Image: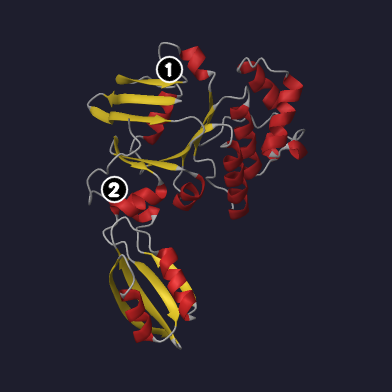
Amino acid sequence: MIEVNHLTKRYGTNTALNDVSFSIEKGTIVGFLGPNGAGKSTTMNIITGYLSASSGTVTVGGFDILDEANEAKKLIGYLPEFPPLYADMTVREYLDFMYGLKKVKLPKEKHIKEICRLVKIENVYNRLIANLSKGYKQRVGIAQALLGNPPVLILDEPTVGLDPKQIIEIRNLIKTLGRNHTIILSSHILPEVQAVCERILIINNGTLVADGTPDGLSHDLSNDHSLIIRVDGPENEVLHAIKAMDHVVDVHSFGEKEPSVYEFAVEGEPNTDIRRDLFALMTRNGWPLLAMRNTDLTLEDVFLRLTSGAQGSFPKKGRK
C-alpha cells in the first residue's frame, strides 16, 4: 500500500533523512518510533505530500506522491500532532467545511454521520470546538482524517495530552480503524505502540535502524532468552525435573521467594518454545506454577538501545 524507496531529505548541509526504505502492506497498523529530531515528522510529511524529498520516491496505492499527487493524497487521511481545528466552529460546521475542502464525493450527511458514530462524537456534534475537551478534539481531528474514507491513515501523536481514560478510548478506536485501514502511528508512548501495532519501525538520526514485530525485536535483540518461573514445590525436586526435560539447556534456582515458593531461571534451546512442556510438567507433579515471564527486552529497552548509540542498526526483517 505504501512504498518508500531510498528516501533522503537535506536542509542545506543537514541531512534529516538518509536513504530510508520500507514498505507497508494493506491493512497493517505500523508504529513509527524515534527520538525528537530523528526524522519521523519529516518522513510523514513527505509521505503525505506536504514536503518534497531531496531524492528517493514514495508511492501510495501505486501513485507517486510527487508526480501523481492528487491521486495519492486522496488515499491518505492525516492527523497531525496538533489537529487543524477551528475553535469558533461547531463540530458540524467544521466537518462540513473539511468535506468541501477535500472535495469528497460521498453523500455528505450520511457520510459525516457514519464517521461521527464511528469516532463517538454524535453527542458533541452541535457544540463549539473551543468548548470540547482535549479527548473530543482529538476525536474530531480523527473524524476529519476519515472524510472520504481514505484507505491510509497517518496519525502523529494521537493521544498526546490525554488522560488515561481518553488514551484507552483512542487506542481502542485505532484498533477498530485498523480493521479497514492501513495505519502509520507515531507516538512516544511505547506501551501504547506495543498494544496497538503489529509492526514497529524505529528511526534514529535520519536512518531506519529497526523494522519488525514488537515481540520479534524484543527477542532478537536480547542476549538472554531464559524463562523466569515461580513454583510452589520442593526446590531440589523441581530443579531436577526441569533439568530432565527435553530442549532444556540450563536451569538454576534463585531460592525461596515466598514460603515454599521458589524461583527458577530456565534456558531452553535456541528457537524452541518450552513453555507448554514446562506447564505440563508442573501439572503432572502437582506443583502450582504461580508465575512465568521471559527475560527478553521490553520495547522501551529496545528503543533506548537502538537510539542511544550503544547499538548499531538492527536487522530490518520487514524491509523489501
Q: Residue furthest top?
A: 67
On the image, which quarter does residue 105 sit in?
Answer: top right
Q: Identify the mark at residue 65; answer none if there is no mark.
A: 1
Q: Amino acid at mark 1?
A: Ile
The residue located at (57%, 42%) in the rendering is 175
Residue, x 33% and y 33% (percent of image)? 319
Query: SS class of the residue under badge 1?
Result: loop
Say which of 162 and 303 sits in front. 303
Is residue 319 visible in the rendered structure shown here? yes
Q: Secondary structure at mark 2?
A: helix
Q: Residue, x 61% and y 28% (percent of image)?
A: 146
Left/right of residue 180 with respect to residue 187 in the rendered view: right
CA separation in Å, label 1 and label 2? 30 Å
Residue 281 drawn at (x, y percent) = 43, 73
- Indicate which disc residue 306 carries: 2
Q: Position of residue 256 (x, y in %)?
A: 39, 85
Question: Which one is nearer the viewer's eye here, 69 or 292?
Answer: 292
Task: Give residue 179's quadrant in the image.
Answer: top right
